Each structure stands twice: as C-alpha cells, then as structure tokens.
C-alpha cells in the first residue's frame, strides 16, 4: 500500500470507523454500528483520508464503495479487530469470578414475556454481575463480542459457536374472542378469514413459512416485523394470528383455534463462543437460563390452560 507509512499514524479507533463504513456500505449504517451520529462518521472518514492522502471510499447515491486502497485498509482493520477480540475472549476466559458484565442477545417476545423473572432471580443470586440485554431479531456476531450469549429459536448453531437446546417452543392459531367461527373449524380451514402476518426480518421464520404454504398470506390485512404487534392487533379484532403459545395463551382476549401445530415445533438454543465456555460468570448465567426455561417448558408447550374454541 503506497500510504503504509501514513497508515501507521492511524489509531485503532480510526480503523473502527473505516471498518464500519466498509461493512455497512453507508454512513448511516456505520453510525448505527458505532452508536454515533451520521455527521461524526462523515467527519472522521474525511479526516482519515486527509491524513492518509488517499481516498478510501467512492461516494455514490446508494452508499460508500471502497476504493482499492480502501479495500487494503479495511482488510488490515479486520485483521486488527480479529486479534483484539480473540485476546479479549482469552482474557475473559481467565476470569474465574462471577463478576463483570454479560451481554445477552435474544428476540423481542422472549425478553418481553419470559426472561425478566429469570434475570431478576439471577441478579439476586449474583449481584456482582451486570446484565446487558439486546432484543433484536438479527443474530449479533458473538465472534466479535457484540454479545456473549445468544438465546435464539431455530435450527443448528452457526459454525464457530457452541450451542445447547434448552427448550422447545410450540405455536397455535389464535382468534379474537369477539370473532366466532363455525364449530369444528381447524387451523387448515381458515382461508376466508383476515390474517395478520410476520414480515420484514421475520418473513422467513417457521410461522411465516406455514402461512405462505396455507396461502393465508394472501388474506393479510396487516403485516409487521413484530410478533408482539401482531398479537396486539389480533386482540383489537383485526384478524387471526399465528403465535408461539407462550405469547398467545396469557392473553385472555384471544382464543386458540385448535391445538398447537406440530409442524411448527421450534428448538430454543443458547449459543456462545467456545473461548467463553469456561468463564465463570458466563457459566453461571447459562445455567440460570437453562434452569429457568426448563421450569417454563409447560408454558412453552401450550399447556398453560389457554382457552380453546372453534
């Protein structure tokens, strides 16, 4: 790289900004990753380019594309990041005390309805540990320490992570209590009803796939990227909704249409990076999550006495 001498003057924080823009392809995306403002990213990238005496990104209407020089610097930044995070994981693994911060990422419905009592019990037992929870449908990168643990419904864990199934989640069709259906109506007999369907980053979850197979998505009157929003819309009487039983059963203004659908049974996985498995605070928190969800299994199975009806 022609500007190698100048690049030696860059701090790691400069490389972070370059890497964020390179990965996001835009200033807005980089700002979100870095938790700073759009103007801050704009100013930093311009200042870095002045320092190097080279343009790192081509500006266009649809975003920022790296120049050949920019690609070289981004590769260096990624290598530095990988070394830093690997060192942090190794140092974290040496900590035998149940103290410090734990970052957990999970999906919104679990955090809203199931996790708070488990987290409260854990904090009472381990006051030296501070919990940081992110509710996001996207899987955060555990390799880059965006989170220490991930609690996710779905299939096998991604490569490079270790995972353990800690629960099973079932799902059912629900109707507003005000909506009457003919006696004997089952989940497969609802083509003439209005539906509320997952969309956006929820468009490929099992629930959304089942609705498409049944062609119920063609009768959608509302789509949303939040199961909580869909549930509340059903409560308001907008239409039928397919929900995890733990989310639909407690709402007494909803009534199940038939039994839980076996095809939608989903495993709940607890994921972590191998370097952290011997860290004491991670170990005790993972144990608390496993025990907490084991106790919740009847609710996850839909055995909590929800109202059933045609």
Image (cartoon, rainbow, N blue to C red):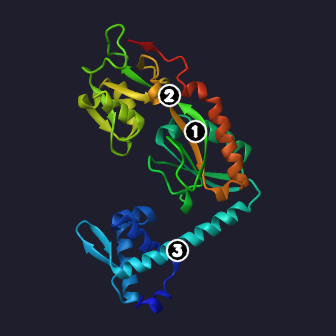
Image position, residue 67 (x, y; %): 33, 79
| Quarter occupied by the C terminus | top left
The foreground one among 73 and 106 is 73
**Disc nearer the start of the sequence (3/2):** 3
The foreground one among 96 and 127 is 96
Write down the residue under mark 3.
79
Where on the picture, by quarter, is residue 151? top right
Where on the picture, by quarter, is residue 253? top left
**Disc nearer the start of the sequence (1/2):** 1
Write down the residue under mark 2.
170
Q: Residue furthest top?
A: 183
Residue drawn at (38%, 72%) of the image: 41
Image position, residue 40 (x, y; %): 39, 72
Q: Are marks 1 and 2 in contact (CB under 8 Å)?
A: no
Figure disc tally: 3
> What distance separates the C-alpha of mark 1 from that of mark 2?
17 Å
Identify the disc placed on residue 143.
Answer: none
Write down the residue under mark 1.
115
Q: Nearer the viewer, mark 1 or mark 3?
A: 3
The reply, left or right, for residue 84 in relation to residue 262 is right
Packing grade of label 3 (10 A; few <14, some 14-19, many >=20) is few
Residue drawn at (48%, 78%) of the image: 76
Image position, residue 240 (x, y; %): 33, 24
Q: Is residue 186 above or below residue 30?
A: above
> What distance separates the C-alpha of mark 1 from that of mark 3?
36 Å
Image position, residue 95 (x, y; %): 74, 60
Q: Note whether residue 84 is visible.
A: yes
The reply, left or right, for residue 179 in relation to residue 144 is left
| Quarter occupied by the N terminus | bottom left
Secondary structure of the residue carrying tag 2 is: loop
């Amino acid at each position: 790289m022609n500007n190698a001498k100048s690049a030696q003057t860059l701090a790691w924080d400069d490389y972070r900004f370059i890497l964020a823009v390179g990965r996001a392809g835009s200033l807005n995306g980089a700002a979100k990753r870095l938790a700073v403002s759009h103007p801050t990213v704009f100013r930093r990238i311009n200042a870095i380019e002045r320092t190097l005496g080279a343009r790192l990104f081509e500006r266009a209407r649809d975003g920022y594309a790296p120049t050949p020089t920019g690609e070289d610097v981004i590769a260096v930044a990624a290598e530095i990041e990988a070394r830093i995070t690997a060192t942090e994981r190794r140092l974290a693994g040496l900590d035998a005390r149940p103290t410090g911060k734990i970052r957990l990422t999970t999906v919104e419905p679990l955090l809203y309805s199931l996790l708070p009592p488990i987290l409260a019990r854990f904090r009472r037992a381990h006051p030296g540990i501070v919990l940081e929870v992110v509710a996001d449908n996207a899987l955060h990168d555990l390799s880059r320490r965006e989170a220490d643990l991930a609690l996710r419904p779905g299939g096998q864990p991604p490569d490079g992570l270790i995972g353990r199934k800690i629960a099973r989640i079932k799902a059912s069709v629900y109707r507003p209590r005000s909506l009457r259906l003919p006696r004997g109506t089952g989940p497969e007999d609802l083509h003439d009803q209005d539906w509320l369907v997952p969309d956006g980053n929820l468009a490929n979850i099992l629930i959304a796939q089942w609705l498409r197979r049944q062609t119920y998505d063609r009768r959608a009157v509302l789509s949303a990227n939040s199961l909580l929003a869909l549930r509340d819309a059903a409560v308001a009487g907008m239409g039928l909704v397919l929900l995890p039983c733990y989310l639909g059963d407690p709402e007494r203004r909803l009534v199940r249409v038939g039994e839980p659908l076996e095809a939608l049974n989903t495993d709940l996985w607890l994921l972590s990076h191998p370097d952290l498995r011997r860290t004491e605070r991670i170990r005790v928190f993972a144990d608390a999550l496993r025990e907490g969800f084991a106790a919740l299994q009847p609710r996850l199975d839909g055995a909590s006495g929800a109202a059933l009806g045609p």
